[in-house]
Amino acid sequence: MKVYVNYQNKRWKRYNIDFEKIANAAVSNVYKDSEISITLVDDKDIKKINKKYRNINKPTNVLSFELGDDVLLGDIFISLDTVKSEAKRENISIEEHTAHMVVHGVLHLLGYDHINERDANRMESKETSILKKLGYKNPYADVNVVCNDASCCPGSKTIAVFQNFFSGCIGRTVLFLLCGFLASLGFAPFYMWWWTLIGIGGAYLLTVRYLPGMGGIKKFLAVLPFSFTYSVAMFWWVLNSIYVVPELAEQFAVWTVPGIIGIGLVGGIIFSIPFLSISSMRANPACRPFLFAGVWAVVLWLREWLCTGFPWNPIANISMNQIYVSNSMSLYGALGLTFVIIGLIAAICEIIKDKNSGLNWFSLILFLSFGGIGILYGIKNIKISEITNGATSPLIRVVQPAQTAIQKASHSREAALQNAKQNTETLITLASDEGDYDFVIFPETSYPFVIVENDTLPLANRLNKPVIMGANYFNNGKMYNSMIVSDEKGQISNVYSKSHLVPFGEYRPFGDIIPTPGQLTPGNGPEIISLNINGNEFAFAPAICYEIIFSDSLLPFGKTPDAIINITNDNWFGKTPGTYQHLDMVRRYAVESGIPIVRANYSGISAFISSNGNVVAEIPIGYAGHLDGFVWGAHNTAYREIGRDNWIIIILIVSCLATIWTSSVSRKTKKR
């Protein structure tokens, strides 16, 4: 390791001290190509430095400034006046005490500290071992210590009390848990996006402060409290479905606790990865924001493929009520906007750690620029979505039955038939209310009878209107969750079957190991369906429930229909956050695709959503009724042209290039 010694106070030259030998004794071969700077000063100079950077207005023996770089480890300042007085008091030579100060300072640059007792013992043991090899005695053999008042390290005695607790395993775990919970509050229905920024930012600072130097397993266990809590706080509502129907509760309630633990562990692994990527002691601070944001985006992209995927609540969704920010997704998509937001959080954290670094400011400005470009494009998308071009849209009626799962259920064949007939009459009554609509949409699985090939839809015949309705479809020995399209006479013209099935709800991803209520067959994927309404073609892309949360999943490439029609049943989740978050996933898809969405939900929230993600009209959770409306503003977006997978490639390229460039500039700057 190269050691650059600067004799700022010339009195140091009278002492025969081999600074390079001492410093190299304190490091392993890992740092053989690294560099440090040792500046030798007096009490007057070190007092100024201590006051400026530590806000402590007194001299000290040694100050270390860690740069966080894998080559340029940092700078050490040692005061001759304090070293002389301490050496005299301890009855040792100035050379011996200086050697201790050099070792102490180098270990600080390597991430060692002594704020709490455990870390102090670890650091003192390391110092003693190194000094013994150099031929010096144990400096801690008596009560005298190097930094017993924390004057050479950040923080005062009061702060040190808190640091002593929170830097320990228990305190650090508490902080990670708190950060994970706060990070979940930015999503619907809370929309406290600032807590998400603080939660992720806090976990980021904890990671770069405490995780370097730990082993791989210890790092994972350290950050797991954040990712576990974050996942459970966002997804606990999934298990609400167990308790909607008593028969299901009786069979599946035993899986509640394992389910919560499973959600936490799977999410814990997934959301730990970005933090582990920046936890290396050798990670360059200026590179970390790009690495962190890039890995986060890639992790979300990979999450879309696990067990058919579950791309729920990308960080971009915390912006859904900030229309100019959320419409950035018409350019970047959810993954791209997530990259920008996460990068901003990380860049701000690096500024907090070192506001004097020009590269840290570069990172922040770059991510702010990405955000600004996205907002400008978003404003354009908002304007386009409001243009009707004089097109005539059919008047669409959406029906929301708002019946409970128990009202839909039955316990015998006779009761099932009676209940089905009664539910059908309820649907007809709700759809027959005043209004001259052109066609009607009923929610997912709202038709209480199974549809088979060459079947008809008597309900449409009675309404004398074209009908779009959710039902179970049986064909060739297989059951499907389908959207049935019929004309006003009840003749079925199209059957679209759901292609993205819900794991553990609609199919068994692990066979019969974990019981599952249903075993459905997936459909063939995206298509466009056309209706002839009063001599005009109305084209729409069908989407059933869960599959609308997948980017690029519904629209055949190059096709721009008049609308997306999404039928769903959130009965299983009631008034939990999941129902509100599902609506936001639909709004996100409208922004990304530039296509308005008509949503029919069994129990709520049914809505008309414009192509800028704005909810034009809705029926709240639990209310039965209908909603009439038009659609307009369908257009193509830059995001749809580029595509999700191409965007992840762009994100990777930007992250890699920025990481390489900032690392290169950092090394060149620090070598001067």
Image (tube, rainbow, N blue to C red):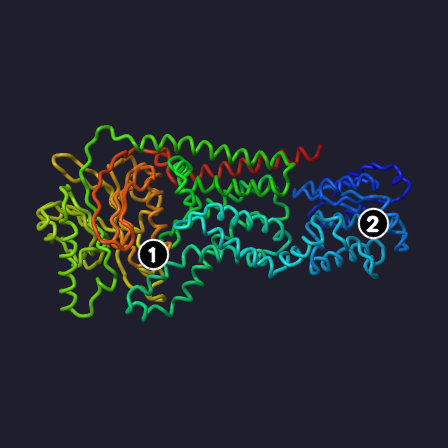
Question: Which label sits on residue 335?
Answer: none
Question: Which label sits on residue 99?
Answer: 2
Disc 1 residue type (three-letter): Lys
Residue 563: give x, y in percent of width and height. 25, 39
Residue 523: give x, y in percent of width and height. 25, 51
Instruction: Residue lying at the far top in this picture: please name it.
Output: 389
Rate crowding at label 2 as few (under 14), some (14 to 19) or many (20 or more) other CA atoms within 10 Å.
many
Q: Splitting the image into 4 quarters, where does residue 253 fall?
A: bottom left
Q: Residue at x 88, y 51 (%)?
A: 87
Residue 180 placement, left or right of 163:
left
Which sits in the foreground, 181 or 203? 181
Q: Is residue 499 visible?
A: no
Residue 412: give x, y in percent of width and height. 17, 70
Residue 213: give x, y in percent of width and height. 64, 53
Which sits in the foreground, 339 or 630? 630
Disc 2 residue type (three-letter): Ala
The residue indicated by pointer 1 is 575
Q: CA distance from mark 2 to mark 1?
A: 66 Å
Q: Residue at x 56, y 38 (%)?
A: 659
In what quadrant of the picture does the C terminus appear? top right
